[in-house]
Amino acid sequence: MLSTHSILGPILFVLYTADLISIVEQHDFHSHLYAECTARAGRRLRLSACIDDIASWMTANQLQLNTSKTDLLWCSTTRRQHQLPCTELRVGADFVRPATNVHDLGTYLHADLSMRTHVRRTVAGCFAALRKLRTIRRSVLTSVYQTLIVSLVLSRLDYGNTTLYGIPANPCRHLQSVLNAAARSVAGLRRSDHITEMLASLHWLRAPEHIQFKLATLTYRSLHGLAPQYL
C-alpha cells in the first residue's frame, strides 16, 4: 500500500495521475487510485522496481513519495500465515516491514482478512458516540434524537460494511450489540427488555442482514450500469 496525499480535487487528481496507471501496468500490477491515497497489491519481486519507477515519476511531477506513511500487508488464510514473507520491502531508500493490519480509507484490513480489527474499532467508536448522545436524550425530541443516532452511530456501522460479508457469528454479535443499544436508547428501554419488536418498528435490519442488503444493492447497481465501472 502506497499513500500519496493530495490537495487536488478528485477530477484534477485523476487528470494529474493519468500517466501513473500506465507505469503500474508496465510491471503487471493493477491499481485503484483515490484522491487521498493510492493502493496497490502484487508480487513482492516486482514491487520494489515498480515503486522506483513511481518515485521517479513523482519527482518529475514535483511530488514526494512519503515512505513513512507507506504500509505493507500480505494476506492469506489463518493456516497459511506462517508462509507469508516477513522480510522488509524496499520503498525508495527506505525499508518497510510487513504489518498485521493496515488502515485504508476508513477500513482496517487484517492479514488473515478476519476483519476483527475493523469490527473492534467500529464497535468502540459507535459506543463512544452513543454515550455522548445519551447526555442530551432528555433535551431533544425523540425524532431528532433518532436522526442523530442514525447519522452519528449507525452510519459508522454502514460505512464499508460490504467488506464484512462472511465474517463469523461472534463479530456479528458485537455489531448487533450496537444496534440493540441504539434502539434501546431511542425507545428508552432497559437493557433487559426485548429488542426485536423495536428494531422492526424502527425498520432497522439486523447486522448480518444489513451487510447482505448493502452487498445486494451494490450487485444490482453493478449489473444495471449504475455503479462505478471498476465494480
Image (cartoon, helix red, strand yellow):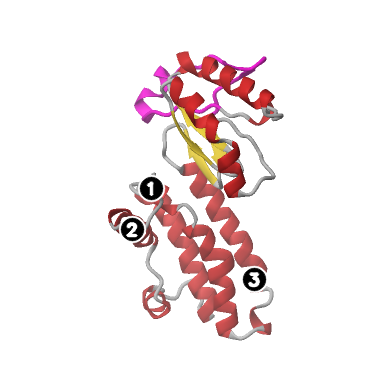
- In the rendered image, residue 174, in percent from the top left (x then y), is placed at 46, 55
Mark 3 and mark 2 in contact? Answer it, CB < 8 Å: no
Give me the residue at 56% from left, 49% from top.
Answer: 121
Residue highlighted by disc 2: 221
Residue on which disc 1 sits:
229
Q: Where does label 3 land, which residue? A: 133
In the rendered image of this protein, does residue 76 appear above or below residue 127?
above
Binning the other alpha carbons within 10 Å of mark 2 as few (below 14), some (14 to 19) or many (20 upward) gives: some
> Mark 2 and 1 residues: CB-CB less than 8 Å, in contact?
no
For the residues labelled 2 and 1, the Cα–Cα distance comes to 10 Å
Front position in the image: 143 or 231:
231
Specify which label sits upstream in the sequence, 2 or 1. 2
Marks 3 and 1, how far apart at CA: 39 Å
Residue ID at (64%, 73%) = 134
Q: Earlier in the sequence, mark 3 or mark 2?
A: 3
- Quarter of the view holding residue 53: top right
Q: Nearer the viewer, residue 126 or 143?
A: 143
Q: Position of residue 61 (x, y in %)?
A: 67, 29
